Image (spheres, helix red, strand yellow):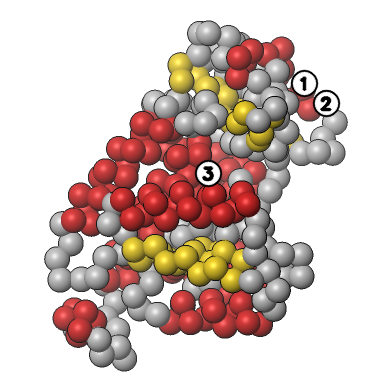
C-alpha cells in the first residue's frame, strides 16, 4: 500500500474534544441541544441515531431522540417539527432519513427552521450553498469530506473532482462544495456512460453510490485522492464503495471504511449544532419566561 490514510476517526475525535471544551466553558446558559426525529424501525437509521446521541452526550450536548411510529401522517410529523422550531431550548433539528414512503421528505425538510437545520437539508440551506453564501449550514458528510481534505493540505483549486452518486444528502452537496473550492466537477450516476473513463480523469474521486467495492485500481489515475463515503455490508463485513485493498496501492490519499468519512459526518453534525446554538444565543427570547431565558435577557 502506498496511499496515505486520511484518518477521519482521529480528526473527528479532535473536533469533538474541541467542542467539548467549548461547551464546558459555557456559563449561565443551557447547553446546546439537538433534536433527532426518527420515524419507523429502519435498523441502519437506529444505529446511526444511537451513534449521534452517544457522540453528543460525550461532549456535553443534549440530544433528544423523538421516536415516532412509521404510521405517523405527514401533518402530524409537521406538527412535531413546528413544536421543535418554536422550542428555544432546541438549537438543532434533524430528521433521520429515509422516511417511510407515504411521507414526502421535501415537505418535512422544508419545514425545519433554516437556523436549526443542522443537516443542511432544507432547500433554503441547500440553495445558499449553491449561491456560495457563507451563512449556509452545510450538510455534515460533504463538510466532513472537505475538512479532511483541508486538514491534509490537499490542493483543490483547479483539480478535477469526480463524484459518483447524485443523492441529495451526499453527491449533490459534495459536488457544489467542491465547485465552491474551485474544483472542476463531474457528477456521475447510475445512468452515466463511460463511468470508468471519467473516473480515470479524476484528481479527486468521491464515491457515494452505495455499491460495495465498485471502484477498482485500474479505474484510478495514479496519485489521485480517493474519498469513500460508502457504508456497505459484504459477507458480514463493513466495506465502502471503493476496493480499498487495490485502490490504496495507486492513490495518493484514501479514506478507510470504517474510520474515514463516517466519524467526520457525526463530528460535523455536532459542530453545526454548536454553531447554530451560538447564533441563536445572540437572539433573546422575550416570550419565554423560564429561568434560563430570563437569565440571558
Ligand atoms: N441518512 C443517511 N445519512 C443521513 C444523514 O446524514 N442525516 C440524516 N438525517 N439522515 C441520514
Identity of the residue drawn at 36% across and 31% down: 10
Q: What residue is drawn where x is 56% and y is 34%?
A: 183
Q: Position of residue 84 (x, y in %)?
A: 46, 77
Question: How far separated are the C-alphas under marks 2 and 1?
Answer: 5 Å
Look at the numbered disc 3 and give the secondary structure of its residue.
helix
Q: Are marks 3 and 1 in contact (CB under 8 Å)?
A: no
On the rendered structure, is 149 left or right of 164? left
Question: Which sits earlier in the primary sequence, circle 2 or circle 3?
Answer: 3
Q: Is residue 252 above or below residue 268?
A: above
**Secondary structure state at the residue bearing disc 2:** loop
Q: Which residue is mark 3?
A: 142
Nearer-N-terminus badge (3/1): 3
Residue that carries the numbered disc 2 in the rendered image: 194
Q: Evaluate if marks 2 and 3 touch, with contact meaning CB atoms under 8 Å apart.
A: no
Give residue 125's position: percent from left, percent from top: 53, 62
- Farthest residue to the front: give it: 236
Circle 2 packing at 10 Å, graded few (<14), some (14-19), many (20+), is few
Q: CA distance from mark 3 to mark 1?
A: 24 Å
- Between the C-alphas of marks 2 and 3, the distance is 25 Å
Q: Check disc 1 and report the residue beneath it.
A: 197
Instruction: Give neighbour class at mark 3: few <14, some 14-19, many 20+ (Cα, 10 Å).
Output: many
Q: Position of residue 220 (x, y in %)?
A: 66, 17
Residues packed near mark 1 inside 10 Å, few (<14), some (14 to 19) or many (20 plus): few
Q: Are marks 2 and 1 in contact (CB under 8 Å)?
A: yes
Amino acid at each position: 500500500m502506498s496511499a496515505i490514510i486520511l484518518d477521519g476517526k482521529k480528526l473527528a475525535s479532535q473536533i469533538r474534544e474541541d467542542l467539548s471544551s467549548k461547551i464546558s466553558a459555557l456559563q449561565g446558559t443551557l447547553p446546546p441541544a439537538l433534536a433527532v426525529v426518527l420515524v419507523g424501525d429502519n435498523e441502519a437509521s437506529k444505529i446511526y441515531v444511537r451513534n449521534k446521541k452517544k457522540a453528543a452526550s460525550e461532549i456535553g450536548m443534549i440530544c433528544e431522540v423523538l421516536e415516532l411510529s412509521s404510521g405517523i401522517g405527514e401533518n402530524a410529523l409537521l406538527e412535531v417539527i413546528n413544536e421543535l422550531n418554536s422550542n428555544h431550548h432546541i438549537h438543532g433539528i434533524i430528521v433521520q432519513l429515509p422516511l417511510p414512503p407515504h411521507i414526502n421528505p421535501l415537505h418535512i425538510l422544508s419545514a425545519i427552521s433554516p437556523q436549526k437545520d443542522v443537516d443542511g437539508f432544507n432547500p433554503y440551506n441547500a440553495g445558499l450553498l449553491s449561491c456560495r453564501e457563507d451563512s449556509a449550514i452545510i450538510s455534515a458528510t460533504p463538510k466532513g469530506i472537505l475538512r479532511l481534505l483541508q486538514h491534509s493540505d490537499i490542493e483543490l483549486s483547479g483539480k478535477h473532482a469526480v463524484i459518483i452518486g447524485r443523492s441529495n444528502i451526499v453527491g449533490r452537496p459534495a459536488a457544489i462544495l467542491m465547485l465552491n473550492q474551485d474544483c472542476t466537477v463531474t457528477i456521475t450516476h447510475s445512468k452515466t456512460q463511460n463511468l470508468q473513463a471519467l473516473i480515470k480523469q479524476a484528481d479527486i474521486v468521491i464515491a457515494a453510490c452505495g455499491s460495495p467495492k465498485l471502484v477498482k485500481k485500474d479505474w484510478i489515475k495514479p496519485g489521485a485522492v480517493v474519498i469513500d463515503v460508502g457504508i456497505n455490508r459484504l459477507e458480514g463485513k463493513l466495506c465502502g464503495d471503493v476496493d480499498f485493498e487495490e485502490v490504496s496501492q495507486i492513490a495518493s490519499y484514501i479514506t478507510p471504511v470504517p474510520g474515514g468519512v463516517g466519524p467526520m459526518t457525526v463530528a460535523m453534525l455536532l459542530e453545526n449544532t454548536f454553531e447554530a446554538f451560538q447564533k441563536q444565543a445572540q437572539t433573546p427570547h422575550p416570550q419565554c419566561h423560564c429561568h434560563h431565558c430570563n437569565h440571558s435577557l
